[in-house]
Amino acid sequence: MSSRRDRSGGLWRAVKEGNVSMKFGLMFVNSGPFSNHDLLAHLAQTAEQCGFESLWTVEHVVIPKDYQSPYPYSKSGKIPGGEDVAIPDPLLPLSFAAALTKKIRLATGVLILPQRHPLYLAKEIATLDLLSGGRVLLGVGSGWLKEEFDALGLDFHARGARTDEAIQAMRECWRENASSFHGKHFNFGPIFSYPKPPHNDVPIHIGGHSPAAAKRAGRLGDGFFPALGEIPKLQELFATMREAAQKAGRDPSDIELSCMARAAIDSVKAVEDIGISRVVVAPPAFDKEGLSRGLEKIRNEVIARV
């Protein structure tokens, strides 16, 4: 069995067979008030103590003033917190959290992959995975904010193709001794990229709730993470993902499923019933005392009962 299957598909099968309980992640752990190092440290350490499986960071390198692209995760069409909300780089806070914890997974949810060159990102992710003892989970998306791509001088309409190529290119860097990739947007090799991740791979989870994201997860993902919790929509997306996986000659059960959910037993049970093995919830507070109380409450009332 390959390392990739050990770290994603094997885990997913164990969940289905009842050998692994539902996993719980925390979202937005680098944004807004969590850009403060004391609060992030408290969040990371308390979450680990309370049995959370993963920490998830978000990404925007810039927020263009008066952007018109609709934010897809709120009815207002605008990013929570306003245009000037603090959104630190997604990887550096995970490095900080890695140094303060021992076992909690370090995830991006999501990193905007087509905005980065895969050679740089493959090196950064491999380094973080090595230093954290193999705890990284790379969640990627293709992006929605056209004005951000414009500011970076990138073609917004090529983002899907760039995402697909970057996923394949990074895996070449992680798995092969001398790595090569020849595509339309990225072209290199043979080259040497070291260090390698401890398992010669890092699980890549595809974010997004569009049909294109579902199909990408089926073709290329170790996991699929639509950042929503509506069960009919999730079932529709998972059906699209499974069909794409089968067309690509892959076993859909090898693709781990995650979603957003309320930190409540009924919400978690409902998504567990449709095959989801990880729920990602928002932090329960924005101060140390509130975080401690809130995370302990989730541990006692939800995590311990699933």
Image (tube, rainbow, N blue to C red):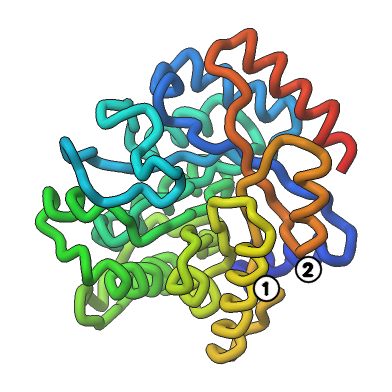
User: Which dot marks residue 13?
Assistant: 2
Considering the image in quadrants, where does the N terminus appear?
Answer: bottom right
Res 96 seen here? yes
Q: For the point 39% across and 69% down, which residue is it? A: 167
Kind of residue indicated by mark 1: Asp
Q: Which residue is drawn at 68% across and 66% down?
A: 6
Residue kind at label 2, given as amino acid type: Arg
Label 1, on which residue? 254
Query: 31 or 89, which lies in front?
Result: 31
Residue at the outermost top position: 289
| Relative to 43, residue 287 above or below | above
Q: Percent x, y for residue 240?
A: 57, 78
How far separated are the C-alphas under marks 2 and 1? 7 Å
SS class of the residue under badge 2? Answer: helix
Residue at the image point whose x is 34% and y is 72% from the top: 169
Q: Earlier in the sequence, mark 2 or mark 1?
A: 2
Question: Mark 2 near mark 1, Cβ–Cβ under 8 Å?
Answer: yes
Q: Residues within 10 Å of mark 1 (few under 14, many from 20)?
A: many
Residue 177 visible in rendering: no
Label 2: how many residues lie within 10 Å, few (<14), some (14-19) or many (20+)?
some
Viewer-side residue, 50 vs 189: 50
Choose between 249 and 120: the one closer to the eye: 249
Q: Where residue 120 appears, x then y in whole percent? A: 27, 55
Q: Is residue 290 above or below residue 223?
A: above
